[in-house]
Amino acid sequence: MLNNFLGHFKTITIHKFKVMALCFRCGLYKQGLLHDLSKYSLTEFIPGVRFYQGYRSPISREKEVIGYSRGWLHHKGRNKHHFEYWIDSIQGEFQGVEMEIPYVIEMFCDRVVASQVYAKENYHDGYPLEYFLNNKAGYYLMHPNTMQLIESLFVRLKEKGLDQTIDYIRKEILRNK
């Protein structure tokens, strides 16, 4: 259990600081500082330790074992960079509400870093797009504008690389935000 504790703490801390650095590069200083602080709460941290595997999110394992993830339910309800935060029941139907653009950019940073952390040496700039496309059809319930923006950023990342994508985000997407 000590190995799980140390491994999980190290993983979420590395992730948090890398997302923070990427958010800073995009000009999202407050979001970078506050990113994923809820992962250190007992509600999220304890299941993270219990279901830690080191090569994927403990949330996936927790869902396999008990059928849902208490940590994830807590996390997505407190972190606006997850599209699940933006799902609402509108006229009796669940729909994605359009995300505020700075949170879409934070979601981009989060997915890029999560891909880097879990893929390790297998990471490449097309990896976040591949992950997105593999889950898009059956899993993502996003507002069409949010879906279009995040997908276009992953395509740009694959085609132009991280530095040019960040430059585009700063100059074109967040210029007036």
Image (tube, grey):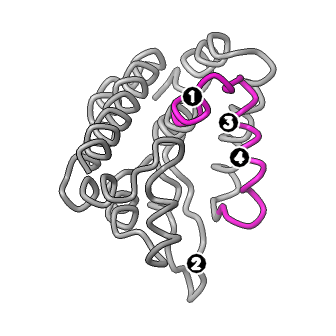
Q: Does label 2 or label 3 sit earlier along the sequence?
A: 2
Q: Residues within 10 Å of mark 1 (few under 14, many from 20)?
A: some
Residue type at numbered disc 1 = Gln
Query: In the depicted view, which residue is nearer to us: 118 or 73?
Result: 118
- Residue 116's mark? 1
Secondary structure, mark 1, is helix
Question: In this figure, which residue is indicated by the disc labeled 3?
Answer: 128
The part of the chain drawn in magenta is 114-140
Q: Is residue 48 magenta?
A: no
Q: Does label 2 or label 1 sit earlier along the sequence?
A: 2
Q: Residue at x 36, y 51 (%)?
A: 79
Q: Residue at x 78, y 62 (%)?
A: 137
User: Which quarter of the image is occupied by the C terminus?
Assistant: top left
Question: Residue 53 location in percent, x, y?
Answer: 46, 49
Question: Residue 154 location in percent, x, y?
Answer: 71, 33
Q: Residue at x 76, y 40 (%)?
A: 130
Image side of residue 134 versus residue 3, left or right = right
Asked if marks 2 and 1 touch (Cβ < 8 Å), the reply is no
Q: Residues within 10 Å of mark 3 (few under 14, many from 20)?
A: many
Residue type at numbered disc 4 = Phe
Q: Nearer the viewer, mark 1 or mark 3?
A: 1
- Residue 94's mark? 2
Q: Nearer the viewer, mark 1 or mark 4?
A: 1
